[in-house]
Image (cartoon, rainbow, N blue to C red):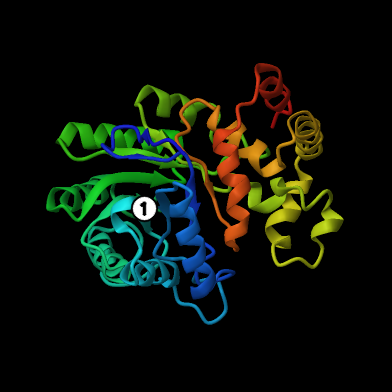
Amino acid sequence: MTPRPLGHTGLSAAPLMLGGNVFGWTAGRKEGFAILDAFVDAGGSLVDTADVYSAWAPGNVGGESETLIGDWLRSGGRRESLVIATKVGLLDGAGGKGLSASRIAGAVEESLQRLGTDHIDIYFAHRDDPAAPLEETLEAFDRLVRSGKVRALGASNYEADRLEAALKTSDANGWARFAVIEPRYNLIERDGYEGALQALALRECLAVVPYFALANGLLTGKYRSAEDVAGHAREQYLKPLFERANVHRVIAAMDEIAAQTGASMVSIAIAWMLAQPGVSAPIASVSRPEQLGDLVAGTQLQLDAAQLARLDGTGV
């Protein structure tokens, strides 16, 4: 995987981001270490996590993913090979909650401790917080960049108007601005990014690292109908996707291209995303190291114009 620049961050990384949401949940310590080893061995360098991962799992409180990554680094993991991104905003803790200045200041120290590193490469606001004034949030982020604890800033799950307001506020005050965005975006769920947010990202030269690149696993080819996910651990996430008008059009188009190329649906999903304007690296998670092969293959797959047009035409 060939490194590419990440917008205005001053960082560069291979065009695939490993999702850490499974660490401490469907991938325990042994599996997590093996996944991270295999990812770096394959040329991967971007790792995405958050302080709240994986608080939803029974018995977890949040911080499990960061702790596993930190333990891997302490055991000999190659920190110099990684661009580590984590997030603040969804887990209450030191300093309060949300994106208040006090919570940001407290959360970054908690994340640094769990990760066992002296800096975070990309620090994301996990979700817009209307209760916290933009000026308060952005000034707090700027202090982290000036202190050296954070290299670059990112915004996850922001609407275009709020992101634009944040960029203007940072610029007006001479503060470090958001350089990376993390929207929910994949072949099935396109309406959240395509349009105003995509136009803003391109205009401002923001790096785009979409999450749920495989639509919660639907684009792996394992699931063909709502009946296939009944009783599955991911049913609550997958079932609504099968209610979207374009889902069967997407699957049919991917099947056609898989027959033409011999590539897996996973590789096709990644290749399509990397061909979209503004996208630097899609985010995808695996629970076993052997699942990485199709993701890496997707970064090397070149779909032709007709194949891209076929996928683009599946609509939203």
Residue, x 46% and y 41% (percent of image)?
A: 209
Kindly tell me whether residue 37 is visible in this rendering. yes
The C terminus, quarter of image: top right
| 105 and 209: which is toward the camera | 209
Q: Residue furthest front?
A: 41
Q: Residue furthest right?
A: 227
Residue type for callout 1: Ala
Residue, x 13% and y 53% (percent of image)?
A: 147
The part of the image, by quadrant, that contains residue 256 is: top right
The answer to whether residue 113 is left or right of residue 309 is left
| 257 and 41: which is toward the camera | 41
The answer to whether residue 288 is left or right of residue 210 is right
As displayed, is residue 25 above or below residue 200? below
Q: Secondary structure at mark 1?
A: strand
Q: Position of residue 29 (x, y in %)?
A: 49, 74
How crowded is the residue under tag 1: few (<14 C-alpha within 10 Å), some, or many (20+)? many
Q: Position of residue 105 (x, y in %)?
A: 22, 62
Q: Position of residue 60 (x, y in %)?
A: 49, 78
Residue, disc 1: 85
Residue, x 71% and y 37% (percent of image)?
A: 263
Kindly tell me whether residue 191 is visible in this rendering. no
As displayed, is residue 6 above or below residue 140? above
